[in-house]
Image (cartoon, rainbow, N blue to C red):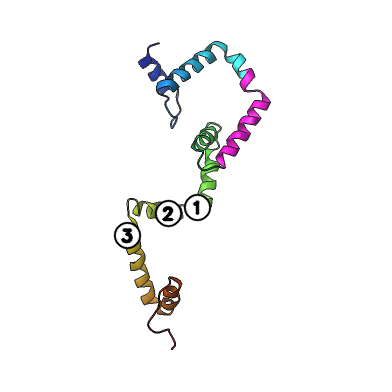
Amino acid sequence: MAQGDHERWLQAQRYPGDVVPVGDKLEFTKRVRDLVGIAGDQIREGLADEGTVKDFVKAVKLGVRDPRNKTCLNLYAQVMKLIGEERRVIVEFVNRLGARSEDDLRRYVETAKSVEGVGPHDGAERCVAYLEAYFNAYPEQRHAAIKRLGGLTPVEPGV
């Protein structure tokens, strides 16, 4: 099978969201697939035995706990999708965000999108504009907030 044919074949075999191997990884993937085609039952016996599967699951679970381990995070998501459990992961993710409804989640997404590409000065300017409006509505809060930020007010309220 020619290199281009093999790449097209790999594309057809992959699941949505899979990474497509290139270079040395492409050659390795080709050899593994060829080997599985020739000796699949023997490989299944060696790799799918109960102890190996338990070790694999344990390793993935440990890797998922480390947010820097993108490989395990991606692998976990792929496995959950393959076994039809990705909805549980999504629901847990949404719950951890604190969203009580779909509208809450939409607001979170819109808020995140509204600050994409915004620099720290733009963000600070928005905060200051909000605080100005807030302190006009609740002037009794101004002194405590300014003091908390390390500033001084010319006259304390009630003096």
Residue under numbered circle 3 = 121
- Mark 2 and mark 3 in contact (Cβ < 8 Å)? no
Of the numbered discs 3 and 2, the one sitting upstream in the chain is: 2
Residue 54 drawn in magenta: yes
Q: Indicate the position of residue 137 as horizontal and vertical percent values.
A: 38, 76
Q: Indicate the position of residue 147 as horizontal and vertical percent values.
A: 44, 75
Q: Which residues are magenta?
A: 45-65
Query: For the residues carrying marks 3 and 2, which lies nearer the camera in this image?
Result: 3
Q: Residues within 10 Å of mark 3 (few under 14, many from 20)?
A: few
Q: Indicate the position of residue 143 as horizontal and vertical percent values.
A: 42, 78
Above-or-below relation of 142 to 123:
below
Q: Amino acid at mark 3?
A: His
Residue under numbered circle 2 = 108
Res 97 label: 1
CA–CA distance in space, label 3 to label 2: 21 Å
The answer to whether residue 151 is left or right of residue 65 is left
Q: Secondary structure at mark 2?
A: helix
